[in-house]
Structure formats: structure tokens, C-alpha cells
Image: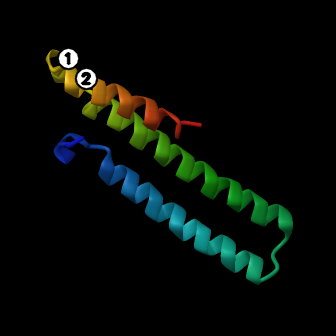
Amino acid sequence: MEENMGKHTSHKDIVNRLKRAKGHLEKVINMIEMEEPCLKVSQQMHAVTKAIYNAKQTFIKDHIDHCLDVEILGDSKKLEESIKDFKEITKYLD
């Protein structure tokens, strides 16, 4: 399905979130290598996981809001493709 990436105003924010998560992940790796306390490492891992999860949720919701729009309703083939796409992408919401 062809997408208009101009509709995705949240992508810049998502990229920034993922870059921050990348920095935090590098910190976690250093913490493990430096044998930091497990509690602190676990807290940082949780923060990285949460940041990536939130970015994923925002990305998927943005896709649903902007790529599966009403203009496809007049075209049964596009509607069928969009429904299939919607079902597929919702598997990644958890």
C-alpha cells in the first residue's frame, strides 16, 4: 500500500524518542559492563523498553489515523487492502 509520508507529522517526534532510547540503551550496556547494581540496571532497562514501546504505539496510531483514511471507502480494492493492513499492524500494539 502506497503511503503519503507527508501526512505523518509525528515521525520527527518518534525519531527523536528513538534516538533518546538509543542513548539510554548504550548507557545500560555501559552499566552492565561496569557491573552497576542490578536494580539500577533494571530500572534503566525498563525506561528504554517503555520509551520504545511508546514510540511504537505512537507510530502505529499515526499510521492508522493517516494511512487508513476515508478516501478509500469508494474503492473496494483499496478498502480490502486497508482492512488487511489494519489487521496486520494491530498485532504490534501489545
Up the image or down, 90 lies above or below 9; here it is above
Q: Is 7 located above or below residue 35 in the figure?
A: above
Q: Position of residue 10 (x, y in %)?
A: 32, 44
On screen, residue 83 versus residue 45, left or right, reads: left
Q: Which residue is mark 2?
A: 79
Where residue 69 appears, as percent x and y from the top left, is: 24, 25
Horizontal and vertical percent for residue 84? Answer: 37, 30
Distance between the Cα atoms at labels 2 and 1?
Answer: 6 Å
Residue shown at 81%/75% (left/top)?
A: 36
Amino acid type at circle 2 is Leu
Q: Foreground residue, 7 or 42?
A: 7
- Furthest toward the bottom, the residue is 34
Q: The residue tagged with tag 1: helix, strand or loop?
A: helix
Residue in the picture at 52% in, 44% down: 54
Kindly identify which residue carries mark 1. 73
**Total marks in image:** 2
Kind of element beneath mark 2 = helix
Q: Which mark is residue 64?
A: none
Along the polypeptide, which appears first: circle 2 or circle 1? Answer: 1
Quick check: marks 2 and 1 in contact, CB under 8 Å? yes
Measured from the top left, where is residue 87 in percent x and y? 44, 29
Q: Nearer the viewer, residue 51 or 78?
A: 78
Q: Quadrant of residue 34?
A: bottom right
Q: Residues within 10 Å of mark 1 (few under 14, many from 20)?
A: few
Q: Is residue 30 above or below residue 71?
A: below
